[in-house]
Image (cartoon, rainbow, N blue to C red):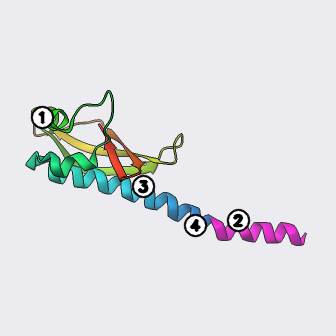
Amino acid sequence: MTRWVLGAVGLWLAAPACTSAVSEKAEAGEAVVRRFFQALPSGDCAVLGPMLVEGQGLSSCEDTVKDLREHDLHLVDIVEAKVDGRDPNAVLVRARVSQGGKERQEPYFFRVERQAEGWRLRL
């Protein structure tokens, strides 16, 4: 019985640490989305580029910015940010966005991934 009690206490003590790590990741993902959309009007890829996932098969920062501006996409608010259940190094951010000055009815999902350089938005 002593082992069970000690095990239960250990799990209880560890739970806040896990919750804290998850919430820190979610907060980091949310922050990247907010920073990106705050900086988007400038169109400055020296600022925006480091916030984006880069790689083969992905659009360049310049093409991404051009596309977002052409569609007049703006962040209205974050609805929810949570760690992707399939990948602990990714956060799914559900957001309200406006397009062409009109808020979309359905939320928009963004994926933010932790990479060696920090958290980055995949568009």
Q: Amino acid at mark 1?
A: Lys
Q: Quote the CA–CA distance across marks 2 and 1.
A: 49 Å
- Identify residue type, mark 4: Ala
Image location (x, y in percent) of residue 3: 86, 68
Q: Which mark is residue 106?
A: none
Q: Which residues are magenta?
A: 1-14
x%, y% of residue 1? 90, 69
Q: Mark 3 or mark 1, which has the lower sequence index?
A: 3
Say which quarter of the image contains residue 94: top left
Q: Residue furthest top?
A: 57
**Mark carried by residue 17:** 4
Query: Element under label 4?
Result: helix
Provide the residue designation for mark 1: 66
Height in image: 11 above or below 26?
Answer: below
Mark 2 and mark 3 lie on one chain; the one further toward the N terminus is 2
Q: Amino acid at mark 3?
A: Ala
